[in-house]
């Protein structure tokens, strides 16, 4: 049996940072279907763009014939991974974790086919929840060297700010996950971000020591922009995959506004477009990059939120910022609409303003604050004075400006803050 070369696909798309026994792993992946896993931390009720790299890696692996296990760390989340953290995480209840886990499973299911045992969703609470402390230390803890653990950068950094004994045990539990997944499902590969390298090594070593079998680890780069900043961070926080946390329109606009230098890497990371088509973007310049961003924004919004939401965000962006002509030959595998029609208003965030309040001619600054478009009335006034507020496309510079009934157009008033934030005030 032979399989298409998924390692080459991952390498060309930028999903390769480190691997254990890289040549052996590549040979294994080319000869047989391999069960592998990636872990997801259920400390929030939604995944964010930082998790999307792992999800896309799983998607490519499954498309090439391998079986993913998405392990939701319901047990390890009771402790919290110290990797990349300068302080201890907030402790969550089991009830909170279960609620978060249910939502995360639903999000992952948009990308991975779980039918006919093609993939598995597993909560490690299944084996961690009933662990006996003495039994765990005797059977698992004896395989770990404290000296070696303290040599890892994750722990060395935390020793400077304080590392609890609870967090110190996280690596043991993640390694135990690998052992249990090997025993239960024949899992032979763990994948994750490069900040998980020490934990992945610990798991592979534990399986080797306990079972005498070779298993493998693979990491992909941490998600950063060309400027070195963490990708997916916005003014309001993380870029969430849940539409109630980050609207499809705001999600779409994030990708429209990325740095030109990040376009090619993001097309490789976050779309399923052929690599050969993406490579052609490297030679483009100027306005062509803006067209590529439109394709990127549409493709990733389609994957995360579905075609209907992507179409609405595409149309709303055109309504707000103008049409970008997309030639049929430009990234031709993309299903991005080559025109600019659709239900634009549905994608732009809507806020309700009562008719009686509008008739009272409220101060614009007060409305911006009361509807949480700005954090305070002072901020709203400063933004108006600086010329950063537009009503129905017209700039407002009077900090004492009021909203009037004649501004209403077909039951709404269009508000724009700066270049990127658009709202519709719905008059009811």
Image: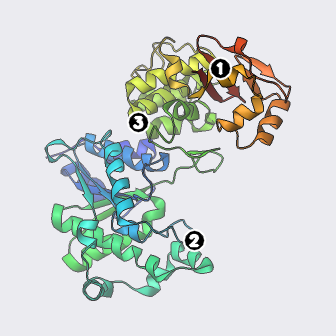
Tag 1's secondary structure? strand
Q: Would residue 121 appear left or right of 252 to someone viewing this image?
A: left
In which quarter of the view is residue 259 placed? Answer: top right
- Position of residue 146 relative to residue 224, above or below, is below
Colour option used: rainbow
Q: Is residue 348 visible?
A: yes
Residue 386 in view = no
Query: Is 135 placed above or below 274 here?
Result: below
Q: CA distance from mark 1 to mark 2?
A: 43 Å
**Which mark, residue 304?**
3
Q: Is residue 228 above or below residue 130?
A: above
Q: Nearer the viewer, residue 409 or 202?
A: 409
In percent of width and height, residue 421 lies at: 65, 30
Do the CB atoms of the residues marked 1 and 2 lie less than 8 Å apart? no
Whether the residues at callouts 3 and 1 have beta carbons within 8 Å, the answer is no
Q: Please name which of the two marks, 1 or 2, marks the residue nearer to the observer.
A: 1
Name the residue beneath numbered marker 1: 414
Horizontal side, residue 387 vs residue 269: left or right: right
Corner quadrant of residue 320 = top right
């Amino acid at each position: 049996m032979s399989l298409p070369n998924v390692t080459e696909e991952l390498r060309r798309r930028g999903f390769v940072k480190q691997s254990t026994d890289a040549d052996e792993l590549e040979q294994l992946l080319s000869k047989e279907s391999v069960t592998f896993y990636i872990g997801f931390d259920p400390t929030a009720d939604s995944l964010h763009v930082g998790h999307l790299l792992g999800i896309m890696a799983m998607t490519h692996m499954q498309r090439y014939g391998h079986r993913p296990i998405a392990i939701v760390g319901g047990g390890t989340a009771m402790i919290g991974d110290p990797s990349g953290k300068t302080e201890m995480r907030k402790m969550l209840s089991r009830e909170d974790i279960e609620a978060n886990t249910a939502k995360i499973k639903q999000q992952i299911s948009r990308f991975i086919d779980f039918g006919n045992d093609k993939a598995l969703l597993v909560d490690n609470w299944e084996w961690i929840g009933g662990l006996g402390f003495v039994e765990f230390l005797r059977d698992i803890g004896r395989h770990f060297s404290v000296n070696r653990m303290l040599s890892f950068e994750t722990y060395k950094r935390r020793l400077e700010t304080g590392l609890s004994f609870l967090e110190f045990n996280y690596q043991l539990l993640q390694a135990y996950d690998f052992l249990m997944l090997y025993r239960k499902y024949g899992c032979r590969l763990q994948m994750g971000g490069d900040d998980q390298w020490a934990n992945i090594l610990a798991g592979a070593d534990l399986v080797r020591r306990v079972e005498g079998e070779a298993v493998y680890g693979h990491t992909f780069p941490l998600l950063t922009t060309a400027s070195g900043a963490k990708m997916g961070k916005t003014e309001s926080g993380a870029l969430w995959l849940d539409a109630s946390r980050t609207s499809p329109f705001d999600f779409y606009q994030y990708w429209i506004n990325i740095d030109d230098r990040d376009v090619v890497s993001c097309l490789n990371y976050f779309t399923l477009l052929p690599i050969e088509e993406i490579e052609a973007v490297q030679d483009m310049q100027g306005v062509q990059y803006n067209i590529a961003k439109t394709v990127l924004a549409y493709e990733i919004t389609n994957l995360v939120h579905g075609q209907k939401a992507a179409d609405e965000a595409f149309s709303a962006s055109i309504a707000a910022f103008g049409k970008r002509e997309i030639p049929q030959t430009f990234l031709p595998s993309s299903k991005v609409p080559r025109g600019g029609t659709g239900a634009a208003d549905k994608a732009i965030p809507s806020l309700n303003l009562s008719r009686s309040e509008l008739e009272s001619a409220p101060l614009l600054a007060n409305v911006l604050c009361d509807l949480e478009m700005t954090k305070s009335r002072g901020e709203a006034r400063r933004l108006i004075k600086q010329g950063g507020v537009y009503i129905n496309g017209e700039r407002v510079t009077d900090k004492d400006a009021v909203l009037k009934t004649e501004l209403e157009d077909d039951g709404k008033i269009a508000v724009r803050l700066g270049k990127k934030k658009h709202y519709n005030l719905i008059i009811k």
